[in-house]
Image (spheres, rainbow, N blue to C red):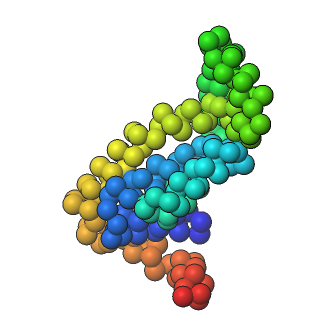
């Protein structure tokens, strides 16, 4: 049921009335949330940015869910990248020492190789995810939107009992 609901939410996001930039921005920021450790200062600042900007919150939550599930697979790569910047790049040692000794900077957890590597990776991946998602939304709306609704799998998913049950429960508060 969880995966069916994710697919349905993704299609609803693509068909929503918001601009492709708002959807892509939400998806890219959600990817950053999903890749980074949650309980850090930069995670808190990222959530503040998300709520200030006019992005699609459903895209944020969907993307964060997907990338959180995938991030654990990339922890060895995040560790290697974080280790490289913490240990191998000698010119940054002074920066890490001063950050560690600053009063609030240790809340960023930059002394953790996985936290630093995932933070750097999320920044590197932000622009490609944003641009790719923006192009995908535009292409979907132009070429695919109407034909997807005719697919049997979409009709099965949207009319399945678990999805209808979930929609009823979700709409109770409205």
Say which quarter of the image contains residue 143. bottom left
Residue situated in front as seen by the camera: 133 or 22: 22
Q: Could you say where residue 64 lies in the image, as x and y percent from the top left? A: 57, 53
Total marks in image: 0
Is the C terminus in the top left, top right, bottom left or bottom right quadrant? bottom right
**Residue 71 in sight in this render:** yes
Image check: 55 left or right of 49? left
Quadrant holding the N terminus = bottom right
Q: In this view, does 174 lie above or below 122?
A: below
Report the front residue among 53 and 82. Answer: 53
Residue at 28%, 65% in the rendered image: 145
Position of 165 relative to 46 (above/below)? below
Q: Where is residue 138 in the image (x, y as percent from the top left)?
A: 27, 56
In the image: residue 8, left or right of residue 96:
left
Where in the figure is residue 65, as x and y percent of width and height?
A: 59, 55
The answer to whether any part of residue 60 appears in the image is: no
From what the image shows, is residue 157 above or below residue 25? Answer: below
Q: In this view, does 137 lie above or below 155?
A: above
Picture residue at 71% right of the left edge, 36% below the top? 105
In the image, farthest residue toward the left = 142
């Amino acid at each position: 049921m969880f995966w069916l609901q994710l697919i349905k939410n993704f299609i609803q996001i693509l068909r929503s009335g918001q601009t492709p930039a708002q959807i892509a921005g939400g998806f890219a920021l959600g990817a950053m949330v999903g890749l980074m450790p949650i309980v850090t200062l930069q995670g808190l600042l990222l959530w503040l940015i998300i709520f200030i900007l006019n992005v699609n919150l459903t895209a944020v939550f969907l993307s964060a869910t997907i990338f959180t599930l995938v991030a654990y697979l990339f922890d060895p790569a995040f560790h290697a990248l974080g280790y490289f910047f913490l240990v191998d790049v000698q010119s940054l040692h002074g920066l890490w020492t001063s950050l560690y000794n600053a009063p609030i900077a240790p809340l960023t957890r930059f002394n953790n190789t996985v936290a630093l590597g995932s933070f750097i990776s999320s920044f590197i991946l932000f622009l490609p995810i944003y641009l790719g998602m923006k192009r995908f939304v535009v292409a979907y709306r132009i070429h695919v939107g109407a034909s997807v609704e005719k697919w049997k799998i979409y009709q099965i998913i949207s009319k399945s009992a678990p999805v209808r049950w979930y929609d009823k429960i979700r709409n109770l508060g409205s």
